[in-house]
């Protein structure tokens, strides 16, 4: 039963010093600064409003850290789920996504009780690299419309149809949107060369936003597209449950469960190698 006890409880039992608390507070601030803009970006890329990404990052991040099995592993937004979430939202809406996520959680619990983590060593490395490379390509293709400022009401979910639609609307590009996007990428690459201590993502977001505001550039913003971010948390609630909807969402829920388990286990292996623990 010891392996079922959250690592946070084990750390408290072993003794949690003031120095460890201060170090964790500093790390938490750093992670929050980086994770919240990413959560907004991934939510938008997944076809959702940005506040859903923020709320999910806050609530899920707290629960995963409190109940997880790693001393240093945190929960946050990941690009691997953009493709999956986008497809579920397009087919079943936000309520379908919420139900699929709950189902995936149940599946992960049973996978943990069955010792699924011990099977991670059998996954071929080329499979993981090919998988992540494919995800990167799909995420890249999903951002073309906003990067070039194309005048399109909607973007097809299919990869080939997406690029065909881009070709049909290629003449509607916006030079100002391209300048902002390209400048942000160049600055981010430059900051990464300066060292890991420079908070590149948050610095680029703040600086680019200030320049757009000061120069009055007519490019789309989160406020103009989504109406801003709510100041309060949404009321908790459960999605509508029915046997038919659960049956339809089984493949999507299984995909979410497998992907989240594999990603968590792989990152935990890397973290264990860095700190020399399990």
Image (cartoon, rainbow, N blue to C red):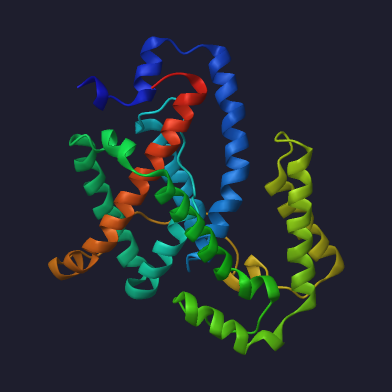
User: Residue at 48% of width from left, 82% of height from top?
Assistant: 161
Residue 6 x %, y %: 32, 26
Q: Is residue 226 left or right of residue 177?
A: left
The residue nearer to you, when weighing 199 against 94, is 199
User: Residue at 44% of width from left, 64% of height from top?
Assistant: 83
Q: Please tell me how many numbered marks the rendered image carries.
A: 0
The answer to which quarter of the image holds residue 67 is: top left
Q: Single out the residue that lies furthest toward the right.
A: 215
The residue nearer to you, when weighing 123 against 194, is 123
Q: Single out the residue that lies furthest toward the left.
A: 243
User: Residue at 28% of width from left, 24% of height from top?
Assistant: 5
The answer to which quarter of the image holds residue 71 is: top left
Residue 98 x %, y %: 32, 60
Residue 170 x %, y %: 67, 85
Tell me if residue 155 can be seen: no
Give the answer, above or below, for where 144 lies relative to 7. Answer: below
Give the answer, above or below, for where 197 lies relative to 210. Answer: above
Give the answer, above or below, for where 217 lies relative to 127. Answer: below
Q: Quadrant of the N terminus?
A: top left
The answer to which quarter of the image holds residue 225 is: bottom right
Residue 198 x %, y %: 74, 38
Tell me if residue 115 can be seen: yes
Q: Is residue 245 left or right of residue 197?
A: left
Q: Quadrant of the C terminus?
A: top left
The residue nearer to you, when weighing 172 against 220, is 172
């Amino acid at each position: 039963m010891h392996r079922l006890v959250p690592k946070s409880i084990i750390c408290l039992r072993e003794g949690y010093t003031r120095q460890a608390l201060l170090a964790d507070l500093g790390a938490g601030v750093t992670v929050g600064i980086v994770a919240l803009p990413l959560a907004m970006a991934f939510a938008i890329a997944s076809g959702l409003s940005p506040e859903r990404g923020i709320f999910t990052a806050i609530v899920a991040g707290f629960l995963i850290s409190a109940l997880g099995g790693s001393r240093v592993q945190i929960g946050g937004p990941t690009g691997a789920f953009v493709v999956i979430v986008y497809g579920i939202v397009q087919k079943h809406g936000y309520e379908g996504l919420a139900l699929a996520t709950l189902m995936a959680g149940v599946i992960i619990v049973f996978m943990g009780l069955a010792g699924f983590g011990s099977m991670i060593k059998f996954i071929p490395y080329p499979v993981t690299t090919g998988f992540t490379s494919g995800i990167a390509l799909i995420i890249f293709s999903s951002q073309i419309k906003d990067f070039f400022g194309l005048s399109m009401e909607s973007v097809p979910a299919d990869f080939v149809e997406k690029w065909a639609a881009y070709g049909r609307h290629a003449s509607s590009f916006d030079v100002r949107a391209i300048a902002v996007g390209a400048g942000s990428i160049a600055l981010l690459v430059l900051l990464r060369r300066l060292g890991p201590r420079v908070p590149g993502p948050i610095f680029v977001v703040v600086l680019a936003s200030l320049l757009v505001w000061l120069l009055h550039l007519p490019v789309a913003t989160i406020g103009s597209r989504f109406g801003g971010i709510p100041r309060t948390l949404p009321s908790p609630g459960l999605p509508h449950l029915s046997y038919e909807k659960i049956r339809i969402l089984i493949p999507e829920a299984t995909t979410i469960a497998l992907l989240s388990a594999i990603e968590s286990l792989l990152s935990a292996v890397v973290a264990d190698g860095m700190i020399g623990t399990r």
